[in-house]
Amino acid sequence: MQANGTGAQEPEQESCRNGESSTSAAGAVHSNGLLSSANNGLPSTESPASDSSTKKKKRLSQSDEDVIRLIGQHLHGLGLDQTVDLLMQESGCRLEHPAATKFRNHVMEGEWEKAESDLNELKALMHSPSAVVRMKFLLLQQKYLEYLEDGKILEALQVLRAELTPLKYNTERIHVLSGYLMCSLPDDLRAKAEWEGKGTASRSKLLDKLQISSFLPPSVMLPPRRLQTLLRQAVELQRDRCLYHNTKLDSGLDNVSLLIDHVCSRKQFPCYTQQILTEHCNEVWFCKFSNDGTKLASGSKDTTVIIWQVDPDSHQLKQLKTLEGHAYGVSYLAWSPDDTYLIACGPDDCSELWLWNVQTGELRTKMSQSHEDSLTSVAWNPDGKRFVTGGQRGQFYQCDLDGNLLDSWEGVRVQCLWCVSDGRTVLASDTHQRIRGYNFEDLTDRNIVQEDHPIMSFTVSKSGRLALLNVATQGVHLWDLQDRVLVRKYQGVTQGFYTIHSCFGGYNEDFIASGSEDHKVYIWHKRSELPIAELTGHTRTVNCVSWNPVLPGLMASASDDGTLRVWGPAPFLDSQETEGLTENYSMDS
């Protein structure tokens, strides 16, 4: 096959032709391989002598050629065709193969027979020649839809029967296409087919499909908007490597400066004490933000639960109400999915469980099955109508909101619980250093996690994929529940045999925070074993850390020193720091 003087067997990667221009039946073609709509302002004829007298240019490397083509494609997208012509002429590069240019032009002009003919020319340049069937199918589908929109039913029927069907490709789609014959109005057709209609928009989308599907190698035709794609990937990679990035990821480039690297300052991260809450008069064992992020509940050895209101503007916490009467103290709290109710559990020797209506401050249920029980952990079913509870003396119950026993599992010494989003499975860590999954519907159970040391507590990510374990004498471990593998062991924290509760946090749960027996709060990026922050201020063991699920810059910690600390960004940031330009941290630092 010959294409404008270029042999079919020519190596595909050779995309530079030293300024060679070409012409085709579609019209005058620039040296960049794209159709010209007007004279580009350069002399139409050039003396061969002037070429020979020009100083021989340095041969461009492959990467240089690629960059020039990427820039050319971007400029062409902006409509700067004369600039593209000059760039390609001076560099000696070609934006795309002339055969690809003919094909592009014929598609954009709706000349389907010529576009099909171009496919035969392009076939030898494809990685997989069999892909021509798929490409032809997409072309004929566009042709068919355009005929239908124009009301040319007989022509459309002919395309369907004589051209699409004989391809014997995607018969299910052909059945769908045949159904469009019943559309009486163009608007109905466009709505049913989810199609923009005849014209530039749908034809451009068709070309994008043909390019994105990699039917044509990039040496022949660049993938659409390739430079923007590479820039977006670079920005995303920098964000991924930014240790302190804790805001919504914007996939676009409009709000990003490409002139500087992306960095977030540590001062924008919740590493600074915003408040010290001293209303409890004994050790604070637990704290947990509500699911909507508007409240914080804290439980203490002083037998009370305090509900704190989060100010939506200042993010300051204010005492809202106190729930009293937990004789053994409060070591665990769980908000219902809609935040209407709060369940409080006590330490090992506590056989009672309290279910409070947070809005009214009234005790709805005080549950105790037996004085021999130990109800130290609880988890809500996703339906908000049931919960499971248990303890280390072998009790494992499923109950309704009135404390009525619905199901029970005998002989399971429960340390910590979590309800899976399927509404049937409950994860329970037990005294055998494992986490097992229990199905209350078919009464089956299976091993999911096995550690070598006691699992003091665990929590699960919103996706349900990852579990964060506080393991006695070992620290914080991250497990993949689906693959049942240990992903990472986080360093720094001091964990003996006290129960410490860690948490996922940050905008996309990219961070992990845990208390420690050395009086500190440790924060890690999920992918980094070393802590990115060690927060000091507490004077005794930090029992629990909770990250606000709605406000990624707000975190709370509870300690045996009798206080809660609320953590946020640095109180004063200058304009440069708010832009995140002052510090540069890498994942390897």
Image (cartoon, rainbow, N blue to C red):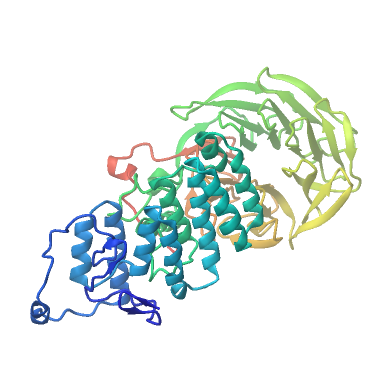
Name the quarter where the N terminus is drawn: bottom left
Q: Nearer the viewer, residue 27 or 364?
A: 27
The residue shown at (23%, 71%) is 21
Image-based side of 545 in relation to 445, left or right: left
What is the x, y in percent for residue 203?
42, 51
Q: Residue 161: image x %, image y %?
A: 60, 54
**Left or right of residue 405, residue 337 in this image:** left
Residue 427 x/y as whole percent? 77, 48
Report which quarter residue 236 is drawn in.
Answer: bottom left
Q: Nearer the viewer, residue 249 or 578?
A: 249
**Can residue 160 be seen?**
yes
Q: Nearer the viewer, residue 207 or 260?
A: 207
Residue 587 can be seen in this image: no
Whether residue 314 is situated above or below residue 444 in the rendered picture:
above
What residue is shown at x 79% (from left), y 33% (from top)? 386
Query: Of all residues shown, which one is farthest toward the front?
Result: 154
**x and y, in percent, of residue 231 in the image:** 36, 57
